[in-house]
Amino acid sequence: MAMCEIAVKFDESERALIQGHADAAGMSFSEFVKRAALEKAEDMADTEAYVEALDMDDGTRYPMEEVLCMAVEAE
């Protein structure tokens, strides 16, 4: 996979805060920022999927015993 380079500007206090956490995690500044950005994007995608699932929820609920029976029957 091709990698691209981007520039993100931080003021000195932001840079120091991020660098301190990156150091504590044993990561480079770049890797820390990359992982944080990817985690945020994944969290947002999860939230969108959750909201979509709520919109499609018809209110049907099953007791655990019935769920277990359905799982056994599906095997």
Image (cartoon, helix red, strand yellow):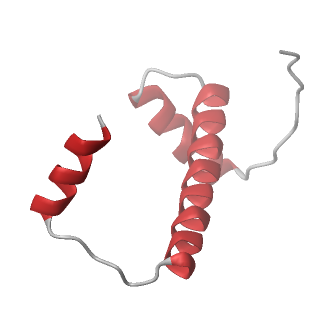
Give percent across and percent down for residue 23: 46, 27
Quarter of the rendering containing residue 59: bottom left
Quadrant where the image shows the C terminus: top left
> In the image, residue 36 lies at what x, y percent?
58, 43
Q: Quadrant of the N terminus?
A: top right
Q: Is residue 28 left or right of residue 7?
A: left
Residue drawn at x 41%, y 28% is 25
Residue 51 sits above or below residue 2 on the image: below
Residue 41 percent location from the top left of the image: 65, 51
The image quadrant that residue 72 belongs to is: top left
Q: Residue furthest bottom?
A: 59
For the point 15% across and 69% down, the residue is: 63
Q: How many marks?
A: 0
Q: Who is closer to the viewer here, 38 or 72?
A: 72
- Horizontally, residue 61 falls left or right of residue 17, namely left
Query: Residue at 56% of width from left, 42% of height from top?
Result: 18
Q: Judge from the rendering whether residue 36 lies leftward or rightward of residue 8; answer left or right.
A: left
Quarter-wise, where is residue 5 in the image? top right
Instruction: From the viewer's perspective, tell me whether residue 56 is left or right of residue 37.
Output: left
Please tell me whether residue 35 is drawn above or below residue 67 in the rendered image. Answer: above
The residue most toward the left is 65
